[in-house]
Amino acid sequence: MDQIQHEMSLPVEIVHMVFENLSPSEVRSVRLTCKKFAAVGAKHGFEEIHFYLRRVDLDKLIAIASHPLISKGVKKLVYEPGTLPCRRLSFEEYSERNNIHIYRLRVERCKKNWLPSHTQDWETPISPDDILENYHQYNKAVDEQEDIVRKFEDYHVLESVMPRLTGLKEVTANNKFAVAGRKTPFDAFFVPIRYSSGGRQMESLMSGGGRRDLQIQSIRGLGIQWTYEGSFLFHKVTEACENMNLKSIQFEFDTVDFSLSADEDRHIDKTVQNVEAGEIANLLQSQPDLESLDIAFTHSSPYVMGYPARLPNIITPGFRWSNLRDVRLRWILTEREELFAFLQQHRSTLQVLHLHYCRFENNTSWIKFFSQMKKTMKLQDVRITGYLTGQYEDPSEYDYVVEGSGEDMDDSEQNWWLGHPEPERPLPMFTRKLMDWLIRDHAPDPFINFKIMTSPWDEDYDEYEYDYEPMDGDFQDPSIYEESDLEDSMDSS
């Protein structure tokens, strides 16, 4: 009892400091102990809210927005991917799915799967009678999903909820499904999880976020399938952002056109057309106070390669952001002087530069580019990964290359493999030396007698995999909230 009274007598400032060092789940648990902790914890336990296309999640958003304290503490909204397939399965089709190992394993791992306990053993077949309740819940979930989509309930809820989240700073439309260990509310059913183009998540968030009285500073669209959404979606995003003063923009586009077969070479054609329309450049130019810019083009199919965007189609030549500090570009086609002019224009503010799978065209060289950067830029964090492709501009550049370095392509071509972008993957020695040289004044020149790989399958790859430390600022996916403790903490207040 004395201990409880002592905790109650703690100054509110101290309690805030304690909660700042706890995870959101821990804060929500501590909130259950007393009214004082419940009030202070309301600002810390609900800072990041993840939700799916289902009614229970939309109801939670309404409850959070209606709470006088919790509504002020929400800083991030994340609209997660994943829905049930549109085509409803018959009971016979559904029953047969329980014999597919990946579905059976996923369903059995769910705490609530509406299956009898004796079905938990993989070797035990699930009878039609045992799977009946699970199928009934599957049908209810499909009915609910169809109703939400038909009535645009997610749009209406966000339009109502977001103006009441007065502390909201960031919104994310997440359509990335390839995250190890990610769970969804639909894992309890014997069907594949369906992932959309990402446009619905982004458009619904923009419908609620495009108000002058909101203070949203960051928007993120991850895994947006550009071939489906294209300029129409971006035009609507730009309209919504007219009322925002954004500090950070991150977009990751999937360029695969799923109307084509895997072996066709036209997958990026629609993306190229949409990028050339200038909607990305228009959006970025409408936000003069940007501090962080991250534009990436990815390929969900291993058979699709290519560079769908040129730098001038993304960043208007000559345009300058006065506070730009962080730039990250992936799968971009540009020229040496083009990229360098952009960086030089922001040299007084730029601190972080990440480039991944970038290609120089028109016979321009990465060696010259890095030399220009070294002389001009003062960066704190540089990360260069993936394939860099360019061409030697000067015969003297050949003197740098060590015999046997793997430069077995055209004599004038630079085709270098600089490692994977993931922070847990070790980087080749040359890559680490290059990044160190670009940051530190007296670091040794990495281009003197350098040996560089031309593919991740280089025979000397193992030689480079040691002594690696993750770099500051590497992205980590936030964990999905636990429904049980979220509900308990909401109920306590």
Image: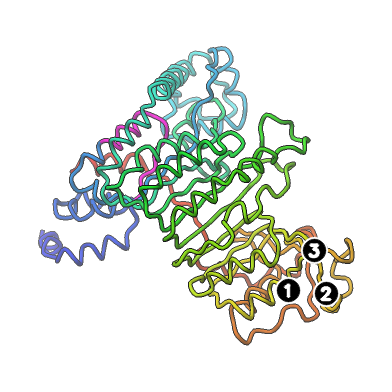
State the separation of the CA atoms marked 1 and 2.
9 Å
Q: Quick check: 213 above or below 236? A: below
Q: Residues within 10 Å of mark 3 (few under 14, many from 20)?
A: some
Circles 1 and 2, Cβ within 8 Å, touching? The answer is: yes
Residue 296 versus residue 174: which sits nearer the camera?
296
> What amino acid is at disc 2?
Asp
> What amino acid is at disc 3?
Asn
Tag shown at residue 368: 1
- Where residue 290 appears, as percent x and y from the top left, is 44, 60
Q: Earlier in the sequence, mark 3 or mark 1?
A: 3
Circle 3 residue: 363
The region drawn magenta spans 48-62
State the separation of the CA atoms marked 3 and 2.
10 Å
State the separation of the CA atoms marked 3 and 1.
11 Å
> What amino acid is at disc 1?
Lys
Does the stretch in magenta take in 219? no
Task: Assign the N terminus to one quadrant of the image.
Answer: bottom left
Residue at (30, 32) in percent of width and height? 59
Task: Assign the C terminus to one quadrant of the image.
Answer: top left
Circle 2 residue: 394
Residue at (57, 56) in percent of width and height? 315
Circles 3 and 2, Cβ within 8 Å, touching? The answer is: no
Residue at the farthest front position: 318
Q: Is residue 287 left or right of residue 181?
A: left
The quarter of the picture where residue 419 lies is: bottom right
Q: Is residue 115 left or right of residue 254?
A: left
